[in-house]
Image: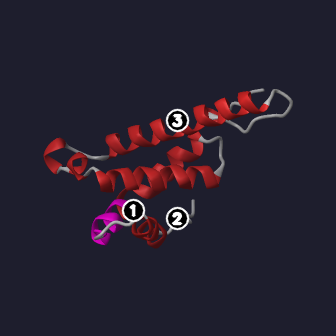
Amino acid sequence: MEIALNPDRLGDVVRDMGAARVDEQLLGALFSAHAPALLSYALRLTGGDRGRAEDVVQETLLRAWRHPESLDPKRGDPRPWLFTVARRIAIDRYRRASCAGRTAGRGGRRRAGVGGVEHR
């Protein structure tokens, strides 16, 4: 599976947030070590929607950057934490879209949700 995510894009997002100093080495290491597995997982969570999956991975890595204490080697491997964060992000986005769909009306189909299940 080819990974189209670009670590430079992640750094751009952090810089756009107004961060005074971006630890690009940390972002690069996180990306190299975990992005392929996170993307594969996020694709399953988003029903195969690559764009949404890439957004989940990007937000997951940004949260890891914002919470470096979660990456402390004394706490063990950070991958379970990253997967939990990715799952929560996907669920939150699904719930937000579901609420927006109910508010907009019941006429149209909604996008595939977590696990690829479509809802009306």
Give the image location of residue 97, x and y in percent: 65, 36
Question: Which amino acid, by three-letter code, is at mark 3?
Answer: Asp
68 part of magenta stretch: no
Lateral position of residue 17 relative to residue 25, left or right? right
Question: Which amino acid, by three-letter code, is at mark 1?
Answer: Phe
Tell me what residue is drawn at x 80 percent, y 29 percent. Answer: 105
Q: Nearer the viewer, residue 76 or 72?
A: 72
Counting residues from the N terminus, which is met first, the one under dot 2 or under dot 3?
2
Q: Residues within 10 Å of mark 2 (few under 14, many from 20)?
A: some
Tell me what residue is drawn at x 68 percent, y 34 percent. Answer: 100
Give the image location of residue 62, x and y in percent: 39, 55
Describe the element under mark 1 as helix, strand or loop: helix
Q: Which residue is mark 1?
A: 31
Describe the element under mark 3 as helix, strand or loop: helix
Lateral position of residue 32 relative to residue 36, left or right? left
What span is in magenta? 22-30
Looking at the rendering, in which quadrant would you find the C terminus?
top right
Q: Which residue is mark 3?
A: 92
Q: Residues within 10 Å of mark 1 (few under 14, many from 20)?
A: many
Q: In the rendered view, how is the structure colored?
A: secondary structure
Tell me what residue is drawn at x 66 percent, y 49 percent. Answer: 49
Q: CA distance from mark 3 to mark 1?
A: 22 Å
Q: CA distance from mark 1 to mark 2?
A: 9 Å
Of badges 3 and 1, nearer the viewer stands 3
Q: Which residue is mark 2?
A: 5
Q: Are marks 1 and 2 in contact (CB under 8 Å)?
A: yes
